[in-house]
Amino acid sequence: MDIGLGYACFVSVLCAFFGWTNYGFVNFQTTKPVICGMLVGLVLGDIRTGIVIGGTLTLVYMGIVGVGAAIPVNQTTATTVTTALCVITGIEMETAIALAVPVSVMGQLGRMAAWTINTPLMHIADKAAETADYRKMTRLQLVGSLVFFLTEFIPVFLCIYFGSSFVVMVNENMPAWISQWLTTATGMLPALGFGMLLAMMYKVKYIPFFLVGFVMCAVFGGSLLAIALLGAAMAIYVFFWGNPGKRRKGGMAS
């Protein structure tokens, strides 16, 4: 069964909206497979298929978590395309679910491109903020939102309109320089994120804690959980007993 342009546009807009809400003012959890799968199935008239596919892919992507600036595979794109192809074309559910992995990689590349494009926009916005140019800041915000929307819309539209063969073809024939460029740009994002955090939180008295965490991770191979617990213990100690003469009890100075 061929998928018409209208169906492809409709599902693509739906998926792009789900992904975009994750960066909006309210997060309705529509990026989660169990939610977006159900909603796609609902609007396409087969909510049962959407729930089954969404639940199955929730188990697949249960351990996928975006930490900091790390960009995981795009489970929203995978769920939307998988559910839509299964409902619209009538292909077997197992066959549709098998497409989730390559589709999620395509969605991941789109999201990498969005962050890469929007990074210089943030620096332009910083300069506009220094001169209180609110109109320019607003325009940049809208442009950044549009970039996120388009990088969600385009991969889904291509996957839905051209079908599963297109997904396989793109993943097998993608030029190496594109993958390398996106990988390099994405690898720079964590460094940029840490730099921004240090610029906002930098104080001389915090440097020892930063060094302890760095040594725990880089030298002794400490896990994130262990470092987080150590940091929490230090924070509790400093808050209650760190300043002699101003002992705190229950969060109030005594």
Image: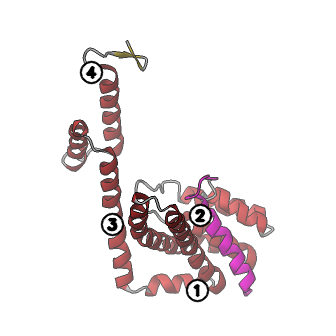
Give the residue number, with chain letter if any, for mark 1. Answer: 165
Q: Residue at x 67, y 62 (%)?
A: 37
Q: Earlier in the sequence, mark 4 or mark 1?
A: 1
Secondary structure category for the residue under label 2: helix
> Quarter of the image containing the N terminus?
bottom right
Residue 243 got which mark? 4
Amino acid type, label 4 = Asn
Quadrant that contains the C terminus: top left
For the residues labelled 3 and 4, the Cα–Cα distance comes to 40 Å
Dominant secondary-structure state across the stretch colored magenta: helix
Q: Name the residue under label 3.
A: 187
Q: Is residue 15 magenta?
A: yes
Residue beneath label 2, please?
Answer: 20
Q: What element carries label 1?
A: helix
- Horizontally, is 236 left or right of 170 in the view? left
- Secondary structure at badge 4 equals loop
Q: Give the range drawn in magenta.
A: 1-28
Measure the C-alpha gap from mark 4 to mark 1: 65 Å
Residue nearest the observer in this picture, 188 or 25: 25
| Neighbour tally class for label 4: few under 14, some 14-19, many 20 plus, Cα within 10 Å | few
Q: Are marks 3 and 2 in contact (CB under 8 Å)?
A: no
Q: Which residue is drawn at 57% across and 86% down?
A: 166
In the rendered structure, which disc, 3 or 4, sits on the residue that comes first in sequence? 3
Q: Quadrant of residue 24?
A: bottom right
Left or right position of 179 against 89: left
Write the residue at 32% across / 29% down: 233
